[in-house]
Every structure is written in C-alpha cells, then in structure tokens.
Image (cartoon, grey):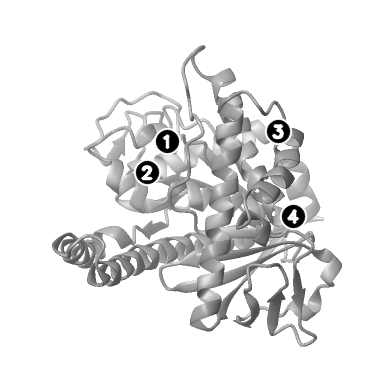
C-alpha cells in the first residue's frame, strides 16, 4: 500500500465543512467505544450495523457518507482489538491500553465512494451531504500513474499549517538498485545517531534541542492568552507549527538516511530495541524521543522490502561489553567511551558494538547471507 499526500486549497466555508466532517467522524468513533463499553458490540459487524442506526437517529451524522461512518467505526474497533491483544500480552486483569474517547480528531477517512477525482487529477470533489465540494490539490506526485480502482482510501487530514488529502493506493512498490556485496552493522546512540561496523559515525541532529528555545517562547505566548480568545487560537497555531516542523525534520532525516544505508549495502543489521521501555528512564526520555530510533528502524525495514535487501534485527544485549576481536567480556560504564581489551583491541565503544551486531546478524542469518554474497561474486 502506497500513501500519496497533497495539500488542498479551499474557501473558508469549505474548510468549515471539512471540520464538520471531522467532528462527525469523532462522534461516530466515540459512540462506538461507548457501545462496546456498555456491552452492545461484540464484533466489528455490530458497530457497522449501528452506523446506519445513528445516521437515522442524528441528522448531522447522516451528512457523512455511509462508508466514511463505517471507516470511523473501524478505527474504534482497531483500538478495541489492540486493547485485547495488550491484555493477552500483559498482566491478567490489568487495563493495558484501554480505548479512550477522542477529544481532538484531526482526520476523516472515505473509502471508495463519496469522492471523485477530476480528469487532470488536480482536484477532488466530495459528494456527500457535508458540502465540502471541490478542493484543489498541490503536490509533487502524479496521480495519473494510477487507476481510480487502485485508490482504496481517501483521507482528509487537518494539521497546524493547513489541510491535506491522502490517497491510499493498492500497489507494491519495488525499485532496482545495484548489488554491492557489502554488509553493515548499526549501533544507534545519543551522542552519535549511529556508528556502523566500518567505523563511520553519523552525528545526531538533535532537532528538538535546537528548536527548544522557539518552542518555549511559543508555549509562553499561549499561556499568556485568555482561554477561548482568538489570540490564544492564533498562538496555538504558531506552537503547532513549531512542533510540526520538528516532526517533519525527524522524519526527513530518518527517511533519507535509511534509504542511503539500504541502497549502499546488501545486508543491514541493527538493534532490536524496545524504545517504549527505554523512554521510561526520565533522565534520558527527551533525548531518546528526539533521536527517533524507531522511525529510523521502520524506514530501514520499508526500504529493505522496496529494494529487496536483507534487514536483520538482533538482540543488543552485551554488544558494548563483548570484545569484537576475542569475544571476552570487558565490563565498562556508560561514561567509558573507549573499548580496551587485554587482547590488544582498542577502538571506540560504539564501533566495537556495531561489529558485534553485524556478527550476530550474520550468524543469525546463516546460509542466507552466504548465498547472497556467492551470487554477488558470481
């Protein structure tokens, strides 16, 4: 599935209609959660049945298309399903990830009806009773490469800097890249974004730390305004844009770096980190969130599928303590940045860990990595 995003331009009354559609979407989702909590929904089919009932009961809910209402109920059931899965994995009787009522919904999703693309693919028209109408689209991607039947979902998203429309296209993305015959191990960190098994270090950009001054200033402006006033709304928009910029910087950096790593190597080995557990360390939580390890891993796995590369996640335990030369365990504190072993091996701590990660990945892959290199040599 490929997601294409375009920014939309509309009149003020059309933007109000989009906001109304988003509120209806939030209403349907919250009604679905309440129905499940009261014991009235045992499956997704029950929620789908009640979507039509709520449309007859509430006139404003009938403005949203039938499939859009079903998509909102699907979101609710997805949250319920995640709750059931977490309960099975977690402690018995503990409410892990219990579904919450949504207070600030920012998107509405349509399926295969209630929208129509123009012939030149430069605008989209929504035909439900919300009155959104025709919206102009601007973006760098060309929708003419895809048939309308391939578009399975259309999503309107509200962000701090405007409104966007997303197209979920049913297609398997594949690209060709020359085989390099190289393997690489990656050790991520806070001082450096990652250190590879070749000794190369990529610096940590620290987007949040660099933009923290502007964030604090924008936050103070919001707190000084009167609640419910127009000036407070404007200040909130400015604060939202500051956060949105940092989020986009992280995503852009992780995406470009992951693509570069995958296209430059045939086998990429990285740490299988549980970031959700690591951020429980309150001393390092902000720095760990800022470096965005999980997003980098997601793009590594995604581009690995796109370019047909092998990506391996290994257990990172004791990779910094073991010597990559002789295998001896050399205990060291987090402040010690140099690995020194009695066998004479002396190198940077992260470089040693990256070599251990690569060795674990190759041993885990077994014959897979060997057969790949044999094909390259042939």
Q: Secondary structure at mark 4?
A: helix
Res 350 label? 2
Where does label 1 land, which residue?
Answer: 276
**Mark 2 neighbour density, 10 Å: few (under 14) some (14–19) many (20 or more):** many
Q: How many marks?
A: 4
Of pointers 4 and 3, the one earlier in the residue sequence: 4
x and y percent of residue 124 in the render? 70, 78
Could you tell me if the residues under marks 1 and 3 are in contact, i.e. CB atoms within 8 Å? Answer: no
Of pointers 2 and 3, the one earlier in the residue sequence: 2
Cα distance, mark 1 to mark 4?
A: 34 Å
Closest to the camera, between mark 4 and mark 3, is 4
Q: Quadrant of the N terminus?
A: bottom right
Q: Secondary structure at mark 2?
A: helix
Residue 258 seen in render: no
Residue lying farthest bottom? 120
Where does label 3 land, which residue?
Answer: 366
Q: Quadrant of residue 68?
A: bottom right
Cα distance, mark 1 to mark 2?
A: 22 Å
Please determine whether, in this image, residue 80 is positioned above or below residue 172. above
Q: Secondary structure at mark 3?
A: loop
Of pointers 1 and 2, the one earlier in the residue sequence: 1
Where does label 4 land, which residue?
Answer: 67
Cα distance, mark 2 to mark 3?
A: 24 Å
Cα distance, mark 1 to mark 3?
A: 30 Å
**Mark 1 neighbour density, 10 Å: few (under 14) some (14–19) many (20 or more):** few
Please determine whether, in this image, residue 140 is positioned above or below residue 179. below
Q: Quadrant of the C terminus?
A: bottom right
């Amino acid at each position: 599935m490929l997601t294409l995003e375009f920014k939309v331009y509309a009149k003020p009354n059309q933007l109000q209609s989009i906001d109304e559609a988003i509120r209806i979407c939030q209403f349907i989702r919250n009604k679905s959660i309440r129905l499940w909590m009261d014991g009235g929904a045992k499956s997704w089919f029950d929620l789908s049945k009640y979507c039509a009932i709520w449309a007859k009961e509430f006139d404003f809910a009938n403005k949203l298309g039938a499939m859009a209402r079903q998509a909102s109920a699907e979101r609710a059931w997805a949250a319920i399903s995640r709750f059931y899965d977490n309960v099975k994995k977690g402690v018995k009787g503990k409410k892990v990830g219990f579904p919450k009522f949504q207070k600030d919904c920012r998107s509405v999703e349509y399926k295969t009806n209630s929208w129509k693309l123009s012939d030149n693919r430069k605008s989209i028209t929504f035909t439900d009773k919300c009155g959104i109408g025709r919206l102009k689209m601007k973006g760098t991607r060309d929708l003419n490469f895809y048939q309308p039947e391939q578009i399975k979902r259309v999503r309107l998203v509200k962000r701090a800097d405007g409104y966007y429309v997303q197209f979920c296209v049913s297609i398997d993305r594949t690209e060709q890249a020359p085989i390099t015959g190289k393997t690489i191990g990656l050790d991520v960190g806070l001082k450096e974004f990652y250190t590879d098994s070749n000794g190369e270090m990529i610096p940590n950009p620290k987007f949040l730390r660099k933009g923290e001054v502007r964030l604090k200033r924008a936050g103070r402006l919001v707190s000084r305004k009167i609640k419910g006033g127009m000036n407070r709304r404007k200040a909130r928009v400015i604060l939202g844009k500051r956060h949105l910029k940092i989020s986009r910087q992280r995503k852009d950096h992780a995406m470009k770096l992951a693509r570069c790593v995958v296209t430059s190597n045939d086998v990429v080995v990285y740490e299988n980190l549980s970031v959700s557990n690591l951020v429980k360390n309150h001393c390092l939580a902000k720095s760990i969130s800022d470096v965005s390890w999980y997003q980098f891993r997601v793009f590594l796995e995604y581009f690995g599928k796109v370019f047909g590369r092998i990506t391996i996640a290994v257990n990172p335990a004791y990779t910094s303590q073991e010597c990559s030369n002789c295998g001896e365990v050399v205990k060291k504190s987090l402040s010690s940045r140099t690995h020194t072993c009695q066998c004479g091996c002396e190198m940077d701590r992260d470089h040693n860990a990256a070599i251990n990660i690569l060795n674990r990945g190759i041993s885990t892959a077994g014959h897979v990595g060997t057969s790949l290199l044999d094909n390259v040599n042939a």
